[in-house]
Amino acid sequence: MVIEGGRPLRGEIPLQGAKNSVLPILAAAVLTGSRCRLRNCPQLRDVDIMLETLRYLGCRAEQQGNTVEVDTAAISRCDIPEEYMRQLRSSVIFLGALVSRCGQADVAYPGGCDLGARPVDYHVAILRQMGVQVEESGGRIVCRSPGRITGVPLSLLFPSVGATETAILAAVLAEGTTTVVHAAREPEIRDLCRFLRCCGARIRTGRDGSLEIEGVAALHGCTFSVMPDRIAAVTYLAAAAVTGGEVRLKGARPAHLTAVLPLLEQTGCRLLLTPDSITLTAPARLRAPGTVCTMPYPGIPTDAGPLLMAMASVADGTTVFVENIFENRFRCAAELCRLGARIRVENRVAVVQGVEQLYAAHVACTDLRGGAALLTAGLCAQGTTVLTGLRHLDRGYQVPEIYLQKLGACVRRRDV
Ligand code: EPZ
């Protein structure tokens, strides 16, 4: 990606559908044994891999524009080879769906962004508590459930997003009721529950985020519209902020960003909110927001950390980032420093001393959100930044260069 920095972004763009919502929904479609149509599905590499995996399993799965059609009636196998599993983390969510639908599952360990250790022990423990026999050997997780899975009370050690999704998928067709205390409360979890309810599942969410899932005998297909992507929203808002621009995001839901929006205001950005749009007007110079501590939802999302770091890099003052979810979230910091940012990282803490101007350089995406942070920084760096490693970016952003061009950025993808 070749980025000529320094142009204020202006205008309006629609927000893509949420990657982290559609990925577990595609795995959940396995449970329906019928046809599901998903609207507002982003066109992403991660979605392609989920669709390829569904086809490998014998299902029909096609995407046309932003609509996906999946028919899981003819599922013919319950193993997933390493080449599919390694490409993304969400592949592990097939585990609960396959063992529930087929009585067995045999998958390799999942891949995904390298943010430090990303074990699957919570997923395995949940399945075991629900009566599933799980064996881990030779890099594979093999599950067997001779009869129907049993609904049980579950209490998560940590509100893991993926583990909560595994619990939900294993529980919707289980015998009896499953309760999940300390479940993750991310909006994408709510979206997965909404999808499953549309398919006939019985799921109640408590005010404290706990879940009560009453197993049903069968699900049916449905047509469902995927929620907008709150992290893509933060990405385009950060891009508007660092370039001193004014951008309206159509479809963005302020209700999903209650921890991030006040932080943007602290940097001096003005926000105009409606239930489904966010308009950001940036100040001449951003102010450092002070401290940014990431937390499970409704806290500041870990995925927003690198984007806020790009903003802090050019803000007036010092910002301290404390990462509480992943052990290696700040991999992009060294690349941001190539653009002139002043960042010191000590384990899970990063101290960013804002500079007045970043300067163009050759930089490489380290992971998905780190790559988005570098793209954001490149948009305000003086000169021509070249960003490589776009495979990371393409996992989570639908043609970002096209949306940025619509906002007046000078960004293009160079054929290699
Ligand atoms: C989801 O990952 C998202 N991915 C991530 O988004 C996001 O960063 C993360 O949730 C946190 O919000 C998808 O939804 C596809 P976790 P997930 O289970 O489910 C530990 C992006 O850029 N843990 O909530 O993998 C784990 O190591 C991505 O879009 C265990 O120890 O996150 C981490 O420290 C990247 N054992 C913490 O829990 C387990 O079995 C939270 O992980 C599972 C998790």
Image (tube, rainbow, N blue to C red):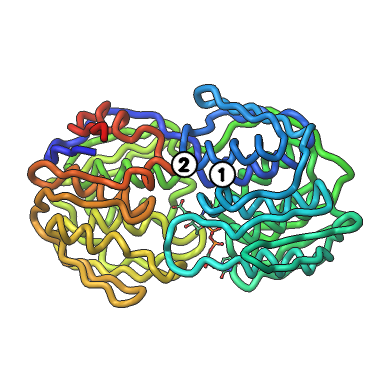
Q: Nearer the viewer, residue 202 or 254?
A: 202
State the residue in front, 380 or 114.
114
Q: Position of residue 171 (x, y in %)?
A: 78, 54
Distance between the alpha carbons at the discs numbered 2 and 1: 8 Å
Place residue 51 in its image quadrant.
top right
Q: Which residue is mark 2?
A: 229
Identify which amino acid the numbered label 1 is placed on: Ser
Q: Which residue is found at the position 40% from the left and 29% from the top?
A: 14
**Which residue, as the protein is rendered here, is positioned at the far top?**
64
Tell me where residue 258 appears, x and y as whole percent: 44, 52
Which three-letter amino acid code belongs to the residue tagged 2?
A: Asp
Q: Residues within 10 Å of mark 2 (few under 14, many from 20)?
A: many
Among the 4 quarters of the image, the one containing residue 167: bottom right
Q: Residue at x 28, y 40 (%)?
A: 280
Circle 2 sits in a helix, a strand or a loop, which is it?
A: loop
Residue position for label 1: 21
Give the residue drawn at x 33%, y 39%: 272
Mark 1 falls on what kind of element? helix
Q: Is mark 1 within 8 Å of ligand 1?
A: no
Q: Residue 175 falls in which quadrant of the image?
A: bottom right
Q: Residue at x 23, y 63 (%)?
A: 334
Of mark 2 and mark 1, the one earlier in the sequence is 1
Q: Is residue 50 left or right of residue 18?
A: right
Percent x, y for residue 365? Answer: 30, 51
Q: Are marks 2 and 1 in contact (CB under 8 Å)?
A: yes
